Amino acid sequence: MGAMFKSRIVIAALVLATAHAAAPAHAQDKAPKSARDTLVIGVSQFPQGFHPNLASHVVLSLVNGMTRRPFTVYDADWRLICMLCETLPSRAAGTIRDWTMPGGEEGVEVDYTIRPGAAWGDGTPVSTKDVLFTWAIGRDETAGVNNQELYRRMEKIVAHDDQRFTIFWNKRTCSAEAINDFELVPAHIEAEAAADPAAYRSRNSYDTDPTRPGLYFGPYRISRVEPGATITLEPNSTWWGKKPAFRRITVRTIENTAALEANLLSGEIDYIAGETGISLDQAIAFEKRHGDRFNVVFKPGLFYEHVDLRLANPILADRRVRRALLHAIDRKTISERLFESKQPVADTFVHPLDSVHTDDVRKYPYYAAMARKLLDAAGWTDTRKGIRHNAAGEPLQLEIMTTAGNRVRELVEQVIQSNLRDVGVDLRIRNQPARVLFGQTIRQREFPAMAMFAWFSTPENIPRTTLHSTMIPTAQNGWSGQNYTGFQNPVMDEAIDRVEVECGADAQNRHWTTIQQTYAEELPVLPLYFRANAFIMPRWLFGVTPTGHQYPSTLWIENWTVE
């Protein structure tokens, strides 16, 4: 971490220490119930944008859970349910049917009905006009929508009236009823900005005017934004569901996780969100010291900490080097020492809790001797002052990046740096604030070698956007896709293509095994561990239900209560 970040953190820590000293003991516990009509949620990152289809960030997901409702979503029991739709489609009900395209390809058509009463925050009804508009802008490659593959597969959409529509998919997929990523945007507001799709990323109202009420249709709407600092939400008067408990919710970003904890203790924030709050080691220590004042819930789930490798880097293009790096990292000790084994070592991106997980993959236990042998075989045989060089005299030097201020990630970086130094690799650390790292560096594939961050996903999530060769972000495709490593492998591509359309149990098991085995063999990514998130709540807050997957607890914000 650079000196300028150290200065800012030290100043913040001093201010926080003063505030904590002045706060009355157990101030939160003693506050009268009548005063608890506001909630301040502490998070460690600020979203790089607010558009639900142009930005992809855990804090944005947290906010969207309060301001929006997806058509379909997985609940806390990992079941697919309807939220914006009236009824989940099914073949039994006749709302999922096979169809054949003019060219003879097999597809599937699925009927949906928008739930009655759904309205944008300015009173405009949510309608099929929004469905058709969102689909059209999603299909335009120049717009740079995240999950462009989703829209490409929607061959057409037919609106029957203002509430009923049918999606015609150009493939006979196994889970056609799930349209979790089909995030509606309001046609009556966004049509003007989208007239030039190539400029839509910079002109959309979510980023130019995020407090406009008509952009939202959840229990809350964004009423104020202080860039990099806070997002304020107020109840949405057009919300059709249960009335939420709080008249105002503030999402406050404190990028340094130690300072985030101090703000909780001083009463400046009420609750640290498990989706993006303090690290597990901090939470374990916090519970031991302050468990009498707060409810601390540890939720294991589909959160995967890893290191993306830039495969265009000549050093990392050699699979032997990639395997050596993973053998050299003592992930088991990291899990035991830092996380009391609550965050198990990962062999692939698929969590053992997921029904499609297989244990039949190549594994890379800590084995420094094997790492040295692989590096020798790759031509890094000349060691000078502890650092390996190749025959051309080039040093084995790499750079790793992660989110600045995240204490546990910075500590893990240092362990990795030390481990790799032991086998002759010179690893340099250069971190960035989350808004820069995720907003540009990773999205535009500007990291030179290694980037450490986490994926969070749904159950049985097919990794098309992260591993398929068509999903590599480029300037030409508007930086669409999440294959940041640049991984291109025909075996992986075929397995991903097939697992989406071959629905029998035997075929599904076979393709999922191929995906995980190919991942472990080729190592486009260094798996680290599966995260458990810590939700730290005041004892007066009830109804927060962690899901253990990518859809946040805030999707049920109307059930949060004060008691």
Image: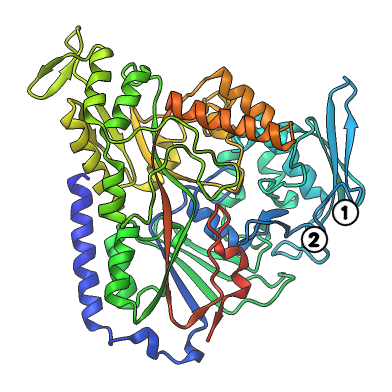
Viewer-closest of 460 and 472: 460
Question: CB of mark 1 within 8 Å of CB of mark 2?
Answer: yes
Q: Is residue 442 above or below residue 529?
A: above
Q: Is residue 478 visible?
A: no
The residue positioned 57% from the left and 24% from the top of the image is 492
Viewer-closest of 79 and 146: 79
- Residue 457 in percent (x, y) is at 55, 47
The residue positioned 71% from the left and 64% from the top of the image is 122
The residue positioned 68% from the left and 56% from the top of the image is 79
Where on the picture, by quarter, is residue 162? bottom right
Which quarter of the rendered picture does the N terminus lie within?
Answer: top left
Give the mark nearest the N terminus, 1 or 2.
Answer: 2
Callout 1 crowding tier (Cα within 10 Å): few <14, some 14–19, many ≥20 = some
Residue indicated by mark 1: 162
Instruction: Classify residue 186 as left or right of residue 64.
Output: right
Could you say whether the residue bearing mark 1 is in a helix, strand or loop?
A: loop
Mark 2 residue type: Pro
Could you say whether the residue bearing mark 2 is in a helix, strand or loop?
A: loop
Q: Is residue 346 above or below residue 495?
A: below
- Residue 347 in percent (x, y) is at 43, 38
Viewer-closest of 278 and 192: 278
Q: Is residue 514 above or below residue 338?
A: above
Instruction: Classify residue 420 as left or right of residue 271.
Output: left
Callout 2 crowding tier (Cα within 10 Å): few <14, some 14–19, many ≥20 = some
Mark 1 residue type: Asp
* Distance from the alpha carbon under mark 1 to that under mark 2: 9 Å
Instruction: Classify residue 363 as left or right of residue 119.
Output: left
Where on the picture, by quarter, is residue 8? bottom left
